[in-house]
Image (tube, rainbow, N blue to C red):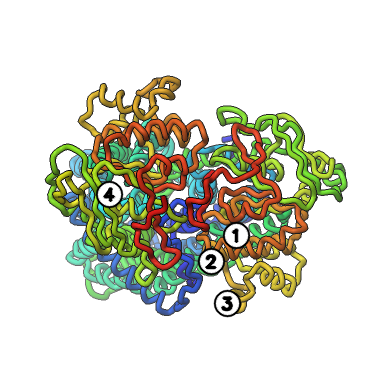
Amino acid sequence: MKDLGFFLSLWRQRRGTMVLGAFLALITLLAMIALLGLSGWFIAACALSVLAPSGQIFNFLLPSAGIRALAVVRTLGRYGERVISHDATLRILADLRGWFFRQAIPLAPAGLLVHRKGDLLARITADIDALDHLYLQILVPPVIAVLAVTGATLFLWLFLPAVALSTLALLAVAGVLLPYLIQRAAHVNARALTVRAATLRIDLLDLIEGLATLRAYDGGGAQIARIQKASDALIRAQTRLARLSATGEAVMVLLLGAAVVAALTLGIPFLQAGGFDGASFPGARLALIVFCVIAVFEAVAPLPNAFQSLGQTLEAAKRLRQIAAQTPPVIFPAPNQSAAPPGDMTISFQAVTFGYETARGPVLKDLSLTVEPGRTVAIRGASGAGKSSLLALLQRHHDPQEGTIEIGGLPLNHLGEEDLAALVGIMDQSPQLLSGSIKENMALARPEASEAEMIAALAQAGLGDLIEQLGDGLESWVGDHGLRLSGGEARRLTIARLILQDPPIWLLDEPTEGLDLATEAKLLETLAPLLARKTVFLISHRPGPLGLADQSYHLEEGQLFPVTASPLPTEYLPQDYPLQD
Amino acid sequence: MSEERADQKTQAERQATNSAAVRRQDIDAAPAVATASEEPSASAADKATDKAAAKIAARWLTAQSASAGHALVAAMGAGVVGGLLVIGQSALLAWILSQTILAGAALSQVAWPLAGLALLYLARAITAYIQGVAGFTAGARVRQAVRLAVARQIHDLGPAHSQGQRAGALLTTAQDQSEALEGYYARYLPQKTLAVFVPLAMVAAVFPVDWLAGTIFLITLPLVPLFMAVVGMGAAAASRRQAVALARMSGFFLDRLRNLATIKSFGQTERELAAVIRVSHDYRDKALGVLRLAFLSSAVLEFFAVISIAMVALYIGMSLLDLFHLGPAEDVTLFIGLFVLMLAPEIFLPLRKLAVYYHERATALAAAEQLEGLLAQQLSDHIPPANKAETSRPDRGPLGLEIRSLSKTFEAGTRPVLNKVTLTIAPGEKVALVGPSGSGKSTLIATLMGFAAADGGEMLAMGPAGQEVALQVTHLAWLGQRPHLFHGSLADNIRLGRPSATDQEVLAAADAAEVLSFAEDLPDGMDTPLGEDGHGLSGGEAQRVALARAFLRDAPIVLLDEPTARLDKKNEAAILAALDRLMEGRTVLVATHSPAVISRMDRVVLLSNLSEPRPVEERLS
């Protein structure tokens, strides 16, 4: 609930729209209750007025005008409520994304990777989607239910307090006790449901990712039988929940029936005893009461659902706040307290020891290395040896547990965030492209760059022809929704970005991984002259990129060992043969 | 690729595409790592295929309802009975009211009808329960049937199909998209029937008592779907556009979040934060425009429901007052009036519920497109020759391997990966297969294993006396590049090599594969759980587990695909020691880059598709 309060205060600017939306929903609901009640009363009154002794004149114009007015209010109210409440939801949606993105900035990337299991980003977006519906599906229904029920109870009280009380009691059961009991019973099952869905997922994943093994050892039939078992178990858990929610619906019908029967049982003797004293058509009041009782149940109908979503949404709210409240893995000095960026690009690691908290031990142990400006250093090593950790430390995604890293004699943690970003450029193992136009991707490197500068950088990266061929030129869309760039082209685009940004230090993480040899050779041809004036850290296990290095090191057991010659008896292998680590 | 079509890709697909670059390295021998950047952008044609795809998906959904069996009928039946009960209930309630209001009946005089009313509510509660549970069962049966069909299909299509980038998408299809069918069968489909039958039954009940009121309903009722269709057609197109806009907005947010490290590396966080907020607000503007139109259809539904209540109330009232004389107006009584008024909102209820469930259909259709697409894939191309063959096996003892002009092309029109490869390996001979990345080494091993079907050629096992039989999976023990550890204990993982093996045999295999040496350090030894939720093993340790499976298999021919790639020195040494034991007395074909492995072989063979295809027999040592 604390988390709920947090998000509500986050949306306080939207209070006006939110209140208006709820108000219109309330009007719409009350209009329906009034319409049915008035119609019932009107019909009964008409029937009674014919029988009544002459002299009692029934003014039918007023109620019939009321009926027409309520019909209009209901229709317009419904439309207005839909539009306004969705407007509020959409504003909330924008606020929520802005808020989370702002919180995520200091955490990325290390702080967003802590949870190793599952796709954290997918879960975050699912949680945010869940919170999008907080207002419309969870907040509004109970609020208007309480108001409408209160209003209806007071109204019934005017005519027959006993029926007001019996109806209120049954509404409370339907709107509060029933959802609560169902929720509590479901909670026991919800856990089983999560576990069984996870088991099924694992069994399916084993089938998909282990298919080669299963096929090699005839294990497919057994694995499919396992999947069937897991799926059966999941469905059994879901069945219990389905029964529970069907029971909820059935009990809701029973409660409505009980309310109607109670109203009649209390109302009929009251009417016989000469109740509704002084009313023009006492009998019509009974019709009014019964129709009101039936209609007011519409107010509590959405509550079980809202209750059910409430639990999930609270969980989502809690998770998002937890992620957002993490301490950033590194804290940069404020812009006014940071040191001036150095002019000397000598990079030195001094007795650096570093490990991830979750890992078994340190990845880098007492590692020292100095790279002179303008030199290209290559790092090789088995997967998991810590090559990428070295680059992550240079970008300050993490701080080492021991030792220091300096650029031009200045410790990395004295540098401001933007200054460090301007010094160090990275070319990732998999090209990281924003889904957007080529221009947007280039602007990331330098927003103020002119189109001519962008085109020049693209041409230098070897993409000049491609850009000319594309109908939309710089506006062509790349990334998820766009043009499928080949592996080589995507890498060239990241190179073009680096050319435009022009940082003095370049970090290349397996820059040609996954490319065929011909593509690799062409890419290296482009890269070689660009690296000449830069200080470069290069990770690769392929001979091509390693050829660019002035000095190579082998990383094993957290230590760097200079590589002097290729350990391979190359004479027995063809010239284009890749090197083994 | 046109933007519109790309936008409709599912999240999983987008993620899969995004990680494609990372995964590509996994598919060593697949030049299918598409380098095509020119995709024809014919958006009109795309739209036509979209429509055709939607039609196929809808037909597929209908066909699947067969799996639901009687449950679907039970759900519909319970709903119809519930509707009939509402009619009886309204009549009884109207009668009680008119008796007490007009005739001054006392409670004791209406005690029986009142008890009957209570019973009708009870009966309605029971039908509501049955409808809910039967609907769920229908959905569950379909989901279960579809999920198993998908699992079998994934299995039959083989590893070549589920490799790399497709893995994530396949998992989504098998789990999430089969789950997404639930609402369609559980709620939408029964309600579609109810929305026709229940209102008609109610109108039919009104007609005999007052045909004019019945006519009012009969006119307003079809007008609802009609007007909804008119407004809805615009709204459907609009809501599709809105779904696209929503996907784009969510996609943008996810994309920027995913690329936050890159954005930070360029120091552009403030700029992209502003962009995220701007895109979200742009979406709001667009979505609201669309929603205003879409909400018209719910307003129309509301309007007709409300207007028919108002018209009925006024008509009845005027008739009772003797101010209205048309048709049956003379005969209107309070009972008739109350009965008709009570049914008025109920007549529109099934339609309103259908409108609420309509999105279930859209969800199911989207899932159906993926499911149908996967299930409709032709298997014939993928059945490996090894499975077609008879299961006879020459006597125990060494078997040789005979490959004759084996060819494999991944995508029509591209260069073949294997071009008439011919290779003979004598029983007990050990051969290293070398060649640059992408030359087809892994493809050759995968084809021999039956993971991918060959386009032509023969694969035979050869007995010591030269007798030939079709190569079968039972002849082969295999070790891949990236061993998969299954959810289960370490022992279970090894036992996969031969499920009938005794504990002793499993232990022996573990010992031979150097698994015991690290298993002793695990919390529960050989019973330590592994896999997704279990204990993590290093790449080298996992490779030793896979090797233990091969030991347990005890097959005459051993196929190894880069068994020592990406290992540190310690693990490489352990694997090499174990390999020496495994290769003893067996026929071996190993794809490798490693000099240490090559030096253990009798012969080295070069496979290359970079130059003109050379006969594989070229000897290098």
Q: Residue A208: percent from the left, percent from the top?
A: 35, 47
* Labels 2 and 3: the sequence-earlier one: 3
Residue A532 position in % (x across, y down): 74, 58
| Residue at mark 4 shares a chain with residue at mark 1 | no
Tell me what residue is drawn at x 85 percent, y 48 percent: A344
Q: Residues within 10 Å of mark 3 (few under 14, many from 20)?
A: few
* Tag nearer the camera, 2 or 4: 4
Going from N to C along the chain, the mark reached first, 1 or 3, is: 1
Marks 4 and 3 belong to one chain: no
Residue at 80% of width from left, 44% of height from top? Answer: A407
* Labels 1, 3: one chain: yes
Tag 4: Cα neighbours inside 10 Å, few (<14), some, or many (≥20)?
Answer: some
Residue B494 in sight in this render: yes
Which comes before the other along the chain, label 1 or label 2? 1
Q: Amino acid at mark 4?
A: Ile
Return the x and y of residue A392 as percentages of the image width and height. Answer: 66, 43
Three-letter code for the amino acid on which mark 3 is drawn = Leu
The residue pinned by badge 4 equals: B425
Chain at tag 2: A
Q: Are marks 1 and 2 in contact (CB under 8 Å)?
A: yes
What amino acid type is highlighted by mark number 1? Leu
Mark drawn on residue A433:
1
Q: Which residue is mark 3?
A: A470
| Mark 1 nearby-residue class (10 Å; few <14, some 14–19, many ≥20) | many
Foreground of the two, B431 or B284: B431
**Secondary element at image label 1:** loop
From the image, tell me which residue sits under label 2. Answer: A485
Q: Is residue B351 left or right of residue B463?
A: right
